[in-house]
Image (cartoon, rainbow, N blue to C red):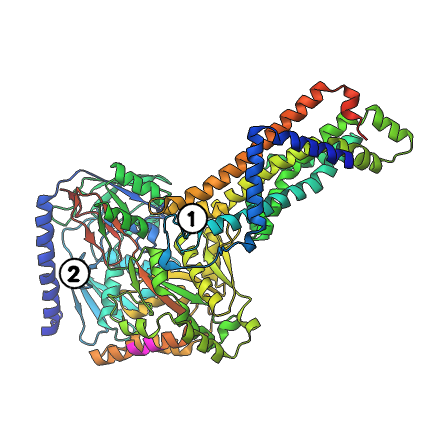
Amino acid sequence: MMKLSRRQVCMTGLALAGAAPLLAAGAAAAQQLKGGTLRVAVLSELANFDPQQLSTVNFHVIKNLYDSLIEYTPDGKPQPGLASAWTIAPDKSSVKLTLRDGVSFHSGAPFKSDSVLATLQKGADPKRGKNVFSTMSIVKDWSAPDERTVVINFKAPAPERQILDLLQFLIPIDPKGIDTVETIPAGTGPYTLVNRAVGQGLTLKANPKYWREKQPIAQDLVFTVFSEDAAATAALESGAVDIVYNGSSRSAVRLKGAGYQVFAGPGPLVQVFRINSTRGPFRNKSFRQAFNHLMDRASILRVGYAGMGKVVALPWAPASPAFDEGYTKAYAYDLDKAKKLIAASGLSADEMKGWKLLVNGSDEPSIAISQIVQGSLQKVGIPIELDMRQGAEYVTALLGGDFAATFGAVGNVQKFPSRVTTNSIYRTSGNPILKDPHPHPAYVAAIAKVDAAAGGEAEVKAAYDNLNRVLVDEAFGIPTNSYDVGLIVASGKIGGITLDIDNLFVARTIGFK
Amino acid sequence: MSEALRSLGKLLRRLAGRRGPALGLAFLALVASAATFAGVLPLDPLAQSIADSLKPPSAESWFGTDELGRDILARVVYGARTSLVTACGAVLIAGLIGIPVGLVAGFYGDWRDSLLMRCVDVLLALPNVLFAMTLIAVLGRSQAAALIAVGVAGIPGFARIARAQVMALRQLDFVTAVRSFGGGPGYLMFRTILPNILSPLVVQAIVLASIAILLEAALAFLGVGVPPPTPSWGEMLRTGKSYLYEAPTYAVLPGLVLTLTILSLDTIGRALTALLDHDEAGMPAEAAGGRR
């Protein structure tokens, strides 16, 4: 048996101690709340039941059908999940997990180390790993000394936060159902699937063998898909549903004013003006840097997101360890500074125009904020047109890099900073927009430095500061604002909302007052 | 031709004598004048003032402001340009293609008729909006694409009306007389028959204009019309519906102008049809066709 150091014991103990008040609070709330049928309006149809496909359209089901190895509190503190304890080796080259006893999958199969191994195997597969794949890049191999223990080894010493992010991202799947998980859920979660009507919604019922005490509170969970935000909010106001999940910020602001409860999670997205620095005038660094000052961030936040969010000049949410408020002030909207940088670029008027701003025509905030940028560019003498594309046509252009510039949100901005590389524009290799070799080697080196900063606080902070400096200097992504995804608007009779670090919908603690 | 135009003028004067069509004509004249002289009015449809966004109607901005603080009245006026240009362009495209197709098909009545009419039937079988969206997907999103899409969708209407009229007139004595004097097919179709079928074609042009305005608005509402920031009534409706709670006038006022424009065109079209039907019923057959 591995001997634990004092630090390791402390960490394990802290994890368990941290969970205690949360469980106590949950139990207290559970006593006051009543069960019943919880009716939730959602604005998008589910893509599939694969928990490794962490797309916003799947956000409403993942945490209701599955559990993570560990959870984060809204302020980023790790809590035990299916792993009741974890121990990071002193050299940070491995982590040992102790799996929770007495848990079973919806199929009835007991939760053991084989399911964690199968989940790791899937995540490490480039074809099946989906969103988890890039996070698995730090993992060298894994083993299971017994049914209740798993050890994950890393290729190199990894920062603690990066290890915890990996554990939080790992959602064990029943090995028997891992090949069919896209169509049939195979988790340990608080609810089990009853039926799904594609395009209309799905019904879940409480898992009678769920491991968390007195959870879930609501016996039935009914999701209804609404194609229009206005229809969903009207359903809430008429009492046809109890909660609207992932509606628009504008509706949330209005409903809050009308007395409804609004909950914004700690995992916002950051809107980024993505620049294809391999094209036209954007090859010029000074021209790109001008866009740091061409973004009227306050107006973008107000018009696009009803003021719900925060203006930012870096791709981090305020909860991120790399977030730095100073950059927002230093790179504020300033047309004079922008004009000076444009002049310093040495480009002629003809060279600066002639490109189009790609716009997601299906997304109203994107249309509005693109027009704000178009107006700012007009003021500095750069007339441009908007290239409106709908749905799949836009996504194809966005992910294929077939654009000069466009707005696109980035996620994973509240966790370990190098997680930002899961977003296409910030990828350090195989970047579909900037291609290989990466045209900004300083950025690639800055990300590598962050990943290697497994030492003291000063080393970590220096690595983050360096990355921030490089991001505004290379200026191929110009962040404008954070905004809330997965907003929860609930009627007054609902209580027990739990905020998830990724803003996923957690129904197990919700009940009726 | 000048006689035909004179009779059209006479028809318009008779229209102006009726209250409904007269109101429609007056409203259309107002919209057309505003669209034509928008440049000289103190209105800027593109000037943004985010601090003044979603303001209700006031003395400064009669229709209020949109989400970017732009004057909605200015955008309605300039949006009229978009709508009218689309309507006129669509009528022109549909007329220039549809009328000759109908003339040839109706005049010859042989395999050419079968071939052309089957092509027209194919166009007619395609739902207008779907066809327009397909065309825009190929040509890209622009005012020209919307105009061509609506124009092509209007071809069958002109072709069928022209064909039916030609078939009714081609055996009449005045056509036989011109033929006996050596008039060739081209002369007969375009100089003899066409001037005598102008009235129903004008009615069709008015009907198509209203369909074109509505279709352009529908395309913009679906997000495939004229790209922003170019003002368009349909685009304003599309965006305005998101702000119905905060600024109801944003969607309602452009919608009202659109409705009144369609209503005016429809009223005029119906009145014209009624007048023409009344004239034909009251005239001897020879007199009805023998205008040359």
* Residue pointed to by mark 1: B62
Quarter of image, res A476: bottom left
Residue at the (88%, 34%) spot, across then down: B183
Output the chain of dot 2: A
Q: Is residue A142 left or right of residue A228?
A: left
- What chain does mark 1 sit on? B
The Cα atoms of the two marked residues, 2 and 1, are separated by 57 Å
The quarter of the image holding the N terminus of chain A is: bottom left
Q: Measured along the vertical axis of the image, is residue A55 above or below residue B22?
A: below
| Magenta highlight on residue A468 | yes
Q: Is residue A5 visible?
A: no
Give the image location of residue B160, x and y in percent.
68, 32
| Rendered-image quadrant of the C terminus of chain A | top left
Q: Is residue A257 magenta?
A: no
- The amino acid type found where label 2 is placed reads Gln
Residue A168 or residue B163, whichever sits in front? B163
Check disc 1: other Cα within 10 Å, few if <14, some if 14-19, many if 20+. Answer: few
